[in-house]
Amino acid sequence: MVFSYRDMMVTPAAVRHGDMFAATARIQDLDGTERSVRLPGAFPNVEDAIRFAIAAGFEYIDCAPRCGAASR
């Protein structure tokens, strides 16, 4: 599943590690620039990992303009 948010696309994913799941998010701009973010934490089920990946992807998009400007 892909979610569109502020002219960007977020693709959440969950990766199984034993009995737990890790969350990742792939974020793609309209110009094709892509980044993958592995998120901290472990989740007991795939649904929680996916929810976290979606929320974190949206938060990353919201923070990017402020955080990028601050590091210059």
Image (spheres, rainbow, N blue to C red):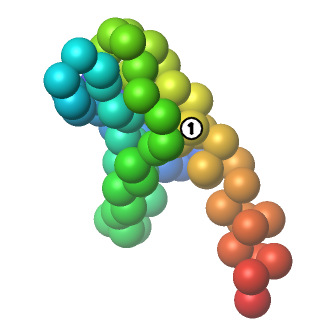
Residue 11 in the image, given as x and y percentages of width and height: 34, 37
Front residue of this view, candidates 21 and 72: 21
Front residue of this view, candidates 15 and 28: 15
**Is residue 12 depicted above or below 1 in this figure?**
below
Give the residue pinned by disc 1. Answer: 56
What residue is rendered at 65% in x and 42% in y? 59
Q: Is residue 33 something that shows in the picture?
A: yes
Front residue of this view, candidates 11 and 71: 71
What residue is rendered at 30% in x and 24% in y? 21
Residue furthest out toward the front: 18
The number of callouts visible is 1
Quarter in which the N terminus is drawn: top left
Residue 35 in the image, given as x and y percentages of width and height: 38, 61
Residue furthest out toward the bottom: 72
Residue 62 in the image, given as x and y percentages of width and height: 70, 49
Q: Is residue 4 something that shows in the picture?
A: no
**Is residue 14 depicted above or below 11 in this figure?**
above
What residue is rendered at 34% in x and 10% in y? 45
Residue 4 in the image, given as x and y percentages of width and height: 47, 35
Front residue of this view, candidates 59 and 24: 24
Q: Name the element at disc 1.
A: helix
Quarter in which the C terminus is drawn: bottom right
For residue 33, which quarter of the picture? bottom left
Q: Amino acid at mark 1?
A: Ala
For residue 16, side relative to residue 37 (left or right): left
